[in-house]
Image (spheres, rainbow, N blue to C red):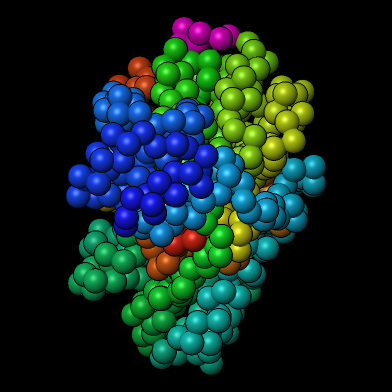
């Protein structure tokens, strides 16, 4: 690149170059990257002339501004950088129209028909069974599955395949695992032998109220099935995730807990400043400029009366004021970013799941903001062609407590188990109150490209068969309850997913 080309690049962006700076740039081994960094900084500071003095301060500024944000940063290719710089002062994501569809038909808000009668429980579980059984039947291995009534009739002996909802799990004195499976035609016990180590290991992931398939046999004179194989609805192997054609990214956050003594306001402010392009290295700012959507997966505020003695841990003791304080943070998020907000168990919404959106009466400022979409929990959305499911994640408490090997420190592993079950909250009667709606809104009919949860306050990202499984951590420090439980949250580590390549970057703000 000769002198004219270098100077032209700056002029194109409305910046004049001091001759000493030109000489300095030419001495740099990584000329192109230096040019891009300088142009970004000049544009952000609206500087029309770039002096040598300014150049010297650049590195210093980057080091003091944002000391911890380097982890997991994806390198952007110079070509992509050029695309940004040739445009006006607008952010990269502003160059593209919004392409967000919230699937209101899968959202419980304003259409709860739950009565809590026995009939509604029956129709809720029937809906769950029918839809998950249909998914299982689409698997080749279960095409010839039969109903339990047929298996129990005298005509049946030998090999069997069937689908049922797990109504009981127990271990015999000899170490066999005994399941009870039910379909609309009957109930049958299934035995997984203690010597069948591999199958027993797989079966550890089975929980009550989920729907599974079984292949096995009925020994002569027995009234139970000995399992040879079990099947979860699962996600197809090697599924190709959908991607965006536009260079836009989504930031995932949750569990902000405004109002708590442990809410980390400075950390949250740094995140907002980064979104606004006010913090970070040029590469980090370039990533920020791609963020067009922000998903907030519940627990916006700490709430009031959520647990005993909570009032001692609140700096804002009124729920309306908590939401008003939260809304003041949201006001500072750049205008071009669209915000999806779902409730969590600390929010002002029905506690039973699926949860309708946070009530307008408590958070009027959020409803007045045209960028904000107030939705239920879970939320199903398509963003630039990418299928996203956001669920607060309260069922992680039940899953972690029931399956050996799962822990609060690696929540994405528990999330993968839920994905295999194709259900966000399968266990009924545990810690999650479930409202028996006529339709099971917690079921994953289609495998999403991104499965987002929070609730456990630990950032963790994994990939399962093409789905990005992401837990977005928290903006709250360790609470006294978490201290007692030996839970160590990871505040201020925020996953940013580039929808064009489905790569995740975890930005650290604390
Ligand atoms: Fe929560």
Picture quarter containing residue 357?
A: top right
* Quarter of the image where one finds residue 493: top left
Instruction: Give the answer, above or below, for where 464 lies relative to 299.
Output: below
> Does the image show residue 339?
yes
Quadrant assignment for the N terminus: bottom left
Residue depicted at 30% across the width and 29% down the height: 52
- Describe residue 386's horizontal placement relative to residue 231 as left or right: right
Position of the C terminus, as image quadrant, is top left
Q: Please state which of residues 455 and 232 is positioned toward the viewer in this rendering.
A: 455
- Compared with 38, 52 (above or below) is above
Q: Depth check: 386 or 437 in front?
A: 386
Q: Position of residue 38 (x, y in %)?
A: 37, 38
Compared across the picture, whether 234 is left or right of 376 comes to left
Identify the residue at image location x=39%, y=85%. Answer: 217
Residue 379: in magenta span: no
Tally of numbered tags: 0
Question: What x and y, as percent, mark residue 189?
Answer: 44, 69
The answer, for residue 448, to whether it is visible in the render is: no
Horizontal side of residue 171 vs 473, given as left or right: left
Camera-nearest residue between 370 and 356: 370
Query: Which x, y percent locates residue 349?
Result: 67, 31
- Residue at 33%, 50% (x, y): give it: 3
Give the vertical position of 455 relative to 301 (above or below): below
Q: Identify which residue is drawn at 41% across, 81% down.
A: 215
Residue 177, percent from left and from top: 32, 64
Q: What is the span of residues highlighted in magenta in the rendered image?
A: 311-317
């Amino acid at each position: 690149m000769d002198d004219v080309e270098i100077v032209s690049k700056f002029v194109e962006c409305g910046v004049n170059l001091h001759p000493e700076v030109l000489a300095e740039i030419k001495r740099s081994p990584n000329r192109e990257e230096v040019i891009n960094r300088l142009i970004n900084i000049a544009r952000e500071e609206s500087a029309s002339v770039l002096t040598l003095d300014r150049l010297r301060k650049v590195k210093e500024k980057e080091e003091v501004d944002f000391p911890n944000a380097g982890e997991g940063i994806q390198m952007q290719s110079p070509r992509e950088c050029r695309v940004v710089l040739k445009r006006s002062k607008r952010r990269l994501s502003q160059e593209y129209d919004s392409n967000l569809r919230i699937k209101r038909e899968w959202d419980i808000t304003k259409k709860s028909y739950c009565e809590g009668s026995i009939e509604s429980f029956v129709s809720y579980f029937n809906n769950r069974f029918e839809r998950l059984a249909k998914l299982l039947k689409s698997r080749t291995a279960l095409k010839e599955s039969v109903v339990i009534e047929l298996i129990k009739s005298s005509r049946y002996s030998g090999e069997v395949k069937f689908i049922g909802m797990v109504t009981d799990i127990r271990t015999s004195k000899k170490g066999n695992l005994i399941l009870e499976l039910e379909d609309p035609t009957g109930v049958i016990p299934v035995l997984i032998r203690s010597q069948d180590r591999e199958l027993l290991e797989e079966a550890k992931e089975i929980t009550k109220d989920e729907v599974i398939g079984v292949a096995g046999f009925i020994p002569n004179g027995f009234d139970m099935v000995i399992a040879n194989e079990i099947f979860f609805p699962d996600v197809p192997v090697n599924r190709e995730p959908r991607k965006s054609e536009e260079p836009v990214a989504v930031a995932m956050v949750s569990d902000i807990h405004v109002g708590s003594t442990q809410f980390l306001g400075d950390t949250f402010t740094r995140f907002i400043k980064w979104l606004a392009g006010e913090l970070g290295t040029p590469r980090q700012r370039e990533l920020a400029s791609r963020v067009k959507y922000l998903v907030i997966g519940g627990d916006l505020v700490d709430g009031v009366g959520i647990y005993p003695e909570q009032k001692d841990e609140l700096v804002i003791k009124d729920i309306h004021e908590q939401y008003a304080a939260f809304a003041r943070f949201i006001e500072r998020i750049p205008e071009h970013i669209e915000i999806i907000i779902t409730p969590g168990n600390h929010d002002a919404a029905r506690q039973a799941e699926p949860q309708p959106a946070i009530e307008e009466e408590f958070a009027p400022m959020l409803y007045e903001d045209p960028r904000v979409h107030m939705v239920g929990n879970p939320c199903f959305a398509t963003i630039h062609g990418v299928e996203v499911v956001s669920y607060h994640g309260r069922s992680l408490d039940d899953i972690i407590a029931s399956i050996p090997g799962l822990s609060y420190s690696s929540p994405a592993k528990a999330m993968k188990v839920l994905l295999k079950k194709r259900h966000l909250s399968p266990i009924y009667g545990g810690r999650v109150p479930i409202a028996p709606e006529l339709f099971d809104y917690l079921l994953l009919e289609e495998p999403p490209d991104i499965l987002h949860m929070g609730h456990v306050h630990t950032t963790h990202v994994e990939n399962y068969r093409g789905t990005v499984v992401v837990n977005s951590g928290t903006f709250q420090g360790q609470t006294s309850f978490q201290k007692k439980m030996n839970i160590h949250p990871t505040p201020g580590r925020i996953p940013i997913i580039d929808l064009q390549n489905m790569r995740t970057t975890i930005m650290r703000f604390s």
